Amino acid sequence: MTDLVVRRLLIDLDTPFTGRWNGGDAFRSAFFNALSMSFPVGEQYFMDSVRNGLKALPESEQDKYAAEVKGFAGQEATHRRIHFLFNSHLENLGYSNEIERRALRRLKANAHRDLRIHVAATAATEHFTAIFADWMLRHPEALAGADPRLKTMWLWHSAEESEHRCTAFDIYQAVSGNHTWRVRIFRYITFVFLTDVMRQTVRNLWHDGSLLSWRSWRSGARLLFAKDGLVRSNYGLWRDYFSPTFHPSQHDGALSKQWLRDNAAQFSLVGQQA
């Protein structure tokens, strides 16, 4: 069980920013923009899936998880709102959010499936975001030179993703989700998540006029595939999910706690789950 606090981020997202807000780096900006474009619809799906999973439990089991799910939904709702505001500026800059349209079509096509499939998909995606979040907190240089308010936004989001990394997984286990389907859905989410994000990143680079720039792809290779890069350095953490005995709590969340403690002035507390 995890006590989750809902926070209101105290940054200005009314003032516009440039497409290359991340230190003027075309690839880093395009990649983070692609991630943000996927978040509003994704966060809503995660909230719906976990809430539906909770409702499917016996009342005695619901009481066990109700506070944590409420905190999870509160954090995800805040992320959805913040990234909607962020994405609105991208839309004003002419960026086309194809990743969101693709996700909505996929969700509509799969809406009829067993709720355990949706909770499994949420748990799988939350594993990805938790890995990414911890990497971000270990490598703030990925936001070197970024607009300070946006750097705060990404690190705050990362800290909360790490903080609630167990919730969807716990609900999946509580609704009798089995290991075979957990792994099967994780493989699917791995393919879809990485493919969608890279397709949107390419679209963003094209709109920015930097798709054919060697500098863009050199930056991308360094961000993703350097020895301590996002993809290469996290293979082991990604692979952990296949173990029958895996639980997200096995991964360290100390950096999340430290960032939230050190940056308390950047947010206000909305409510705390007892």
Image: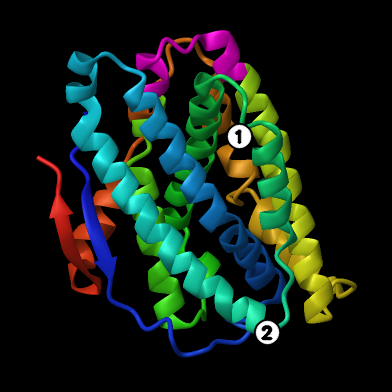
Residue 22: in sight, yes or no? Answer: no
Q: Is residue 180 magenta?
A: yes
14, above or below 151, in the image: below
Can you identify the residue that label 2 sits on? 93
Question: For residue 81, what is the image quadrant?
Answer: bottom left
| Residue type, mark 2 in image | Leu
Is 99 on the left-hand or right-hand side of 159?
right
Is 129 on the left-hand or right-hand side of 168?
right
Who's the residue at 56% across and 22% down the image?
A: 117
For the magenta stretch, what is the residue range?
Answer: 170-183
Whole-percent x, y for residue 260 in the image: 24, 59
Whole-percent x, y for residue 252 in the image: 34, 37
Q: Secondary structure at mark 1?
A: helix
Question: For residue 53, what is the image quadrant?
Answer: top left
Whole-percent x, y for residue 2 in the image: 22, 34
Nearer mark to the viewer, of 2 and 1: 2
160, above or below 155, in the image: above
Can you identify the residue that label 1 sits on? 235
Is 16 on the left-hand or right-hand side of 255?
right
Who's the residue at 16% across and 62% down the image?
A: 269
Q: Is residue 22 magenta?
A: no
Looking at the figure, which quarter contains the C terminus?
Answer: top left
Q: Nearer the viewer, residue 9 or 238?
A: 9
